[in-house]
Amino acid sequence: MHITVIGSGYVGTTLSACLAALGHEVTAIDIDTEIVETINRGRSPVSEPGLDELVATHSGDRLRATTDYGAVEESDVTFLAIGTPSYADGRIDLGGITSAAEALGESLAEIDADDRPLIAVKSTITPPGISEVRSALEAGLGDGEVELATNPEFLREGSAVSDFQQPDKLVFGTDSAWATERLQELYEPLAADVPTIETDPETAMMIKYANNAFLATKISLVNDLGNICKEFGLDAYEVMDAIGLDDRISERFLRSGVGWGGSCFPKDVDALIAAARGEKYTPRILEAAVDVNDRQPKRLLDLLDEHVDVADKRIAVLGLSFKPRTDDVRNSRAIPVITGLLERGARVVGYDPVATESMRERIPEIEYADSAAEALDGAAGAVVVTDWEEFASLDSEFEAMAEPIVVDGRRIVEPTDELTYEGLTW
Ligand SMILES: NC(=O)c1ccc[n+]([C@@H]2O[C@H](COP(=O)([O-])OP(=O)(O)OC[C@H]3O[C@@H](n4cnc5c(N)ncnc54)[C@H](O)[C@@H]3O)[C@@H](O)[C@H]2O)c1
Ligand SMILES: O=c1ccn([C@@H]2O[C@H](COP(=O)(O)OP(=O)(O)O[C@H]3O[C@H](CO)[C@@H](O)[C@H](O)[C@H]3O)[C@@H](O)[C@H]2O)c(=O)[nH]1
C-alpha cells in the first residue's frame, strides 16, 4: 500500500520505518526540514534502538521524507502522528494536529473523492477532541467528504520498534467497513496472532487513555505502597515481587521509585482529568495518582537532605532521560530533581548516556559531564533518576566522590560497604 505519515517524531518515524519494513511504500511528512533531510540521509531523527538501522535500510527505497503535503495524492492511508501536548491546566492542546489536519484537507481537495486516502489519527487525542480534528480536516477540504479513523499507538519509547512489531493489540476506530478493511490490509503482515479491536473512533481513543491511565495509576499505587514500606523499614521490591505472582496483578509495572515521566503518562492523565472535569466529573483516583507522582522527586531530595546539606555542594544527577534507552527528556523526573537541588543551592552536575544535549537545551545553567565517573568526581552526593544499565556496574567511580552518598530513585545501583546508600522505597 501507499502510506503517508504526517509528523516524523518518535511515533511517526517508528511507524514510517516499520511500515516500510512490512513492504509498504511510505512517505514521511514533517514541517521540520532538518528532520526530513535526516530521514532522507538514512538516519532516524530520534534516538530509538533499531530505528537508525531500519531507516538506513529503507530510506531512498520504500521510505522517503518530504515537507510537501502533496505527497498524500498517492496515498491509501494517511496517518496523523503530530504531538498533542497539554496546556498548563492539563487540557489537551489540539493546535498542532488541527493545523496539520486543515493543511491535509486542503491537499485532499485536489484529489478525486473516490481516490482519497483513509485518514487515521495515530496521535493520542481525547474522545471529544476527535470532532475538532474532523472539523479542521473538513475546513481544509471545503466541499466533499473524507473518512477519519483513529488507530491509537501503544509503543513505549526505548523499545518503540520491537513494541510496534510485536504489539499486544491493534485498535481500529472507524465509522465504516471500508475503513476497517483498509486498516486490516495495512496491518495484515503483523496481525496474524495479534488481537484486533474493531470499534468506533471515540472508543478506540478511550482505550488508549484508559490504558495509560491504568498503568500510570498502577505505578503511583506502587509508589504509595513503597513509601509506606520505607516508613516501616521494609523493602517494597520484595513485597512487589510477591504480589506480582498474582496474575490478576501481574509482575509488570511494579517498580517503585521517583515516578513516571515522559511525553505520554503525564500529559495523557492530565488531559483525561481535564476532559472528565469538562463533563463535570471529578476523577479522584487519577488526581491522586498525579499527586503521588508529583511528590516522589521531593521524597528523593528529602532523603538526600538527611545525609548532606547540599547548599554549595557538588551533587551528581545520574540519568536525565525519562527512562533508559531514549534521549527524550520530556517530563523527565530529572527536571523536578534538578530544580529542587538548584533551589537548595546545590552545584548540580548531570550525566546521561544519550540525553545530555536534550536536557542542556531545557536546563542550560547546570554543568554536564561526559561520564558517570566525571559527574561523581568530587561530588558530595549523588541521586539516580533513570535506570540506565550502566549505573548497575558503577563501583570504583563512587570512590572518587568527596562523600560517597547515593540516593537511588530506581533501584539500579549495587550498594557496597563503602557507600552510604539509600533506596527511595527500600
Ligand atoms: N512518544 C510515544 O512514545 C508515543 C506513544 C504512543 C502515542 N504517542 C502519541 O503520538 C503523538 C506524537 O507523539 P511523538 O512523541 O511522536 O511527538 P513528537 O513531538 O516526537 O513528533 C511530532 C512531529 O510532528 C511534527 N509536526 C508538527 N506539526 C506538524 C505539521 N503541521 N505538519 C507536519 N509535521 C508536523 C513535528 O515537527 C514533530 O517532528 C502524540 O499524540 C503522542 O501522545 C506517543
Ligand atoms: O514499573 C515501572 C514502569 C515504568 N515507570 C516509569 O513510567 C514512565 C513511563 O514508562 P514506559 O511506560 O515504559 O514508557 P513510555 O514510552 O512513556 O510508554 C507509555 O506511554 C506511551 C505513550 O502513550 C504508551 O504508548 C505506552 O504503552 C506506555 O507504556 C517512565 O518514567 C518509567 O521510568 C516506573 O516508574 N515504574
Image: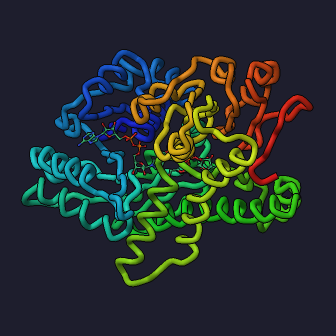
Q: How many marks?
A: 0
Q: Quadrant of residue 243?
A: bottom right
Q: Quadrant of residue 241?
A: bottom right
Say which quadrant the N terminus sits in.
top left
In front of the other: 163 or 299: 299
Most extreme residue toward the bottom is 280
In front of the other: 62 or 340: 340
Residue 147 position in % (x across, y down):
26, 59
Residue 300 position in % (x across, y down):
67, 49
For image coordinates 45% across by 70% down, the residue present is: 273
Q: Is residue 380 left or right of residue 264?
A: right
Q: Is residue 271 left or right of residue 407?
A: left
Q: Quadrant of ligand 1?
A: top left
Decide if residue 156 is in sight here. Answer: no
Decide if residue 147 is in sight here. Answer: yes
Residue 396 position in % (x across, y down):
81, 19
For image coordinates 81% across by 62% down, the residue present is: 231
For image coordinates 88% across by 29% down, the residue present is: 418
In front of the other: 67 or 117: 67
